[in-house]
Amino acid sequence: MTSQVKTRRRPVAVDPVPWWLKVFGGLVVAFFILPTLFVIPMSFSSATTFQFPPPGFSWRLYENFFTNPVWLDSLGNSFLVASLTALLATTVGTAAAVALSRLDGKAARFARTVLMVPIVAPSIVVAVAVYISFLGWRLTGTVGGYVLAHTAIAVPYVLVSVTGALGGFDQRLLKASASLGASPLRSFVRVTMPLISRGILTGAIFAFIVSFDEVVIALFLRSPLFQTMPVQMYNSVTVEIDPTISAASSLMVLAVTIIFILPQLLRGRAGRRQERRP
Amino acid sequence: MTRQTTVEATGSRLGTGLGTEIRLEGVTKDYGLAAPAVDDISLTIEPGEFMTLLGPSGSGKTTTLNLIAGFETLTEGTISLDGADVSAVPPHRRNLGMLFQNYALFPHMTVAQNVAYPLRERKVPKPEIARKVAEVLELVQLTGRDDTHPSRLSGGQQQRVALARAIVFEPKALLLDEPLGALDRNLRAALQTEIRRIHREVGSTFVFVTHDQEEAMNLADRIALFNNGRIEQVGTPQQLYAAPETLFTARFLGDSNVFELGAVGTGGTVAWEGESWGVDPETVAAHPGVRAAGAIVVRPEDVEVAGSRDAVPVGANAVRASVRDVEYMGSYRTLLLTVGERGLLGRARVSALRGEYAIGDEVVLWWRPRAQRIVAA
Amino acid sequence: MSSNKIRWSGWLPLVPALALLAGVLLVPLGKTFVRSVSNPDLTLANYEHLFTDGVTMTVLGRTALTAATVTVAALLLGYPYAYLMTRVGPRARGILLVVVLIPFWTSVMARNFAWIIILQDGGPVQSAFELIGVHDVVLYGTNAGVTIAMTQVMLPFMVLPLFSTLGSIDRKLLLAARGLGSSPTAAFWKVFWPLSRGGVMAGVMLVFTLSLGFYVTPALLGSPQQSLVAQLLAQRTTLLLDFAAAGALGMVVLVITLVLVAWANKVGGTVSALGVVATGQPKERV
Ligand SMILES: Nc1ncnc2c1ncn2[C@@H]1O[C@H](COP(=O)(O)OP(=O)(O)OP(=O)(O)O)[C@@H](O)[C@H]1O
Ligand SMILES: [Mg+2]
């Protein structure tokens, strides 16, 4: 025991990280997260403008957010569209990822690239094209129109996260499953799905966020009768100058942060629990 | 041709008793490469037989097994189980158990859940599942590990679970693709014994793929020796060892002294490097190729060593050699020899009682024509 | 025959995804293209106008310049940050990684609204400049403000490809160069920088390409007189209802983007980097 204590010396850094680099890293971190945090004090402002710093404290903006039917309806619409999008994109994207993991060759690679296009195509171009077509198909301003458009741009995220999960999946298990009498569909349900559930869940969360947060296409598809929350937020800065947006923004920042930090914290705790095991 | 295997009837309720006949006719699988992976194979595996597919890497064993299992589609030919053509039946309806080299256990299920998997797929009632799982785990000596996850088991234990899972639903036959390949030597030997025992107890047809000739010899009722997508020879281990038809078979199974000849004539003697050797017609392979080109194969244990030609009995075939090296193996020695004028490498296994040899000794090798085998080159 | 059947059934699960994509994206884009070249006869007039109307080219140039500025800024901030990520312990690295992803995943509107507050007349940036004696700095409504806000969102696309490249460089090479007598600076430029160029290339291409298509940020933070190409496209669609002209411009933007992405993909596996950014699964963890 004593010898162990003796030999445990502070390691001398041969190749230290320079202090100024750490400071620089800190500044970049601040640039990443601080600006967005400005919306939080704003959300407790008593002002009726975007004045900063806020002149006084008040819950008025939250009150307004949770009582004003315009905000509440747009929040409800966003939830509806995002949930349906997550459902559809996860189903369709998981099927595609599983199929692609078993195919190879030029055609399969091409199909994968095509499915990734929505992630790289500028959303404004997509929005304009979708808008013009959906006008003709009478899909603008409908839940179906939003869900279809959002699903198309959410599928790549599901594809990537499920493909990632499938990377660690042993395809030979499917052979085993078939030899034990399970049809391909049963094998998928009993073997593939449980083993890639994390990737599917991640994909579903991403699909939800992508849709929930989508502005550009939503701006084009909106109608007076149906608009989502990001569109209402957009209106509140461009048309209405309604500071309720800061309450809405704070809630969204909070929600996304929780979604992101939570798995990290859970994983950290699970990791520590495992370390404690002898 | 085919040997009838005796199936020991045992009390196990798992056993199907008889097993299934697997018949391959003109089976071909072409991936579009230079040569077909499996090229016009015909083979009948008897009910309850332990058949081993043996051959070097890339010779088409796994492909053949996958064709039987239904994981690959036939390019040509038919495969039938008990006379019924299954070429168009998908793998999950063929009712064949399969064992993989990497075990392929479901990591998210416990041992018991893994073993119950095929029974649940067949909608077996719960109490019966529990009974059968317990029974088969006892058979593979894993009682009490039901709730363990496979990752917590050793390689050997994992393969036992996979074995239990593959036989619990009483498949028509069990297909094993190098199931012991990932295990160390001792464990391999132990599991070989166990697989033999289980084969006896369940009495179903086993098709076992390996590239290890020793494993094939230990386990098999019959061996189908693969080479370049074709079957070189089918027979019991003894037949393949003692009466190879081709040089490939002779070389693949055990050590041998090989003297390559030109065409094998119909006369009573053959010539090799000026020596004239007697031929026993019974030892000439029936293989048609032997007429075009042949080789004499003599196993090291069938070779005798003499000090000079005077000591060679009349009627024996002899050749001059010198000792290159001596391996001491307990009661016998293996002499590594330089044989004939061109210095062919030879081997002889001699009893230590016959005296010792030193490197550089000039000797004469001899053997009776009955001990040699003339095969197609 | 049966082998063909199996081959086709393997593609079956792809059909819904491809059909959806075709219906929602490819068909509309195709129709947009057709409309842009027919009026009603085959014509390239809509494309010629882009060059001659005196506005489009100016806006395209301004957009490219903005994108280039964002790219340089992201590289200057992202390179040291990515380097730092490779040098700290796993826990700190995890935190730095989450921090990178947060702006990408925070609500677009919340982020842009925050920038409005910060950059507006009387906002904190102006106050900060007052402190050091510089008066009346209002970045709201300027291209500079747009650039700053865009840099923040684009940083992950620079940092993550760089992180994966820098992480794979053997640091012993650097120490070896030091051992051979190079100064730390010289060792960096002669050894580390050349080895990191693949990641730099991927990051640069990615950030530049994605920056070309920004709509919300310039629309909210910029000025209509200084509009970028996305704004022009929106304007022609919804205000002027000139679908043919808008389609032509949209096609040009799309083609430029796809060509750049395809090229970048050849250079540095950009599309996969994009997936990494999107889902926060850097290679390291997979
Ligand atoms: N899916 C495939 N596509 C193309 N060629 C294949 C495929 N599977 C096998 N082959 C080829 O077919 C030949 C036979 O392969 P197979 O796996 O059956 O050999 P094997 O006898 O099992 O060898 P090993 O002892 O190495 O497992 C090889 O040349 C192999 O490269
Ligand atoms: Mg094999």
Image (cartoon, coloured by chain):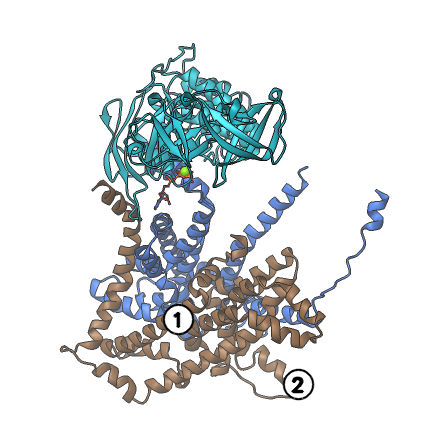
Chain colours: A blue, B cyan, C brown
Q: Which part of the image, by quadrant, shows the N terminus of chain A?
A: top right
Distance of mark 2 from mark 1, alpha carbons?
45 Å
Q: Nearer the viewer, mark 2 or mark 1?
A: 1
* Quadrant of the picture in which ligand 1 is shown: top left
Q: Is residue B230 above or below residue A265?
A: above
> Which of the 4 image quadrants contains residue B216?
top left
Q: Is residue C65 left or right of residue B190?
A: left
Residue C238 x/y as whole percent: 29, 75
Three-letter code, disc 2: Ile
Which residue in the protein does label 2 denote? C132
**Of B186 and C241, the residue lying toward us:** B186
Residue C282 x/y as whole percent: 52, 58
Which residue in the protein does label 1 denote? C263
Residue drawn at 41 percent across, 77 percent down: C219
Three-letter code, disc 1: Trp
Residue C103 x/y as whole percent: 52, 65
Q: Which part of the image, by quadrant, shows the C terminus of chain A?
A: top right
Q: Is residue B236 above or below residue A78?
A: above
> Which of the 4 image quadrants contains residue B119?
top left
**Of B76 and B345, the residue lying toward us:** B345
Residue C275 can be seen, yes or no = yes
Regarding mark 1 in the picture, which secondary structure is present there? helix
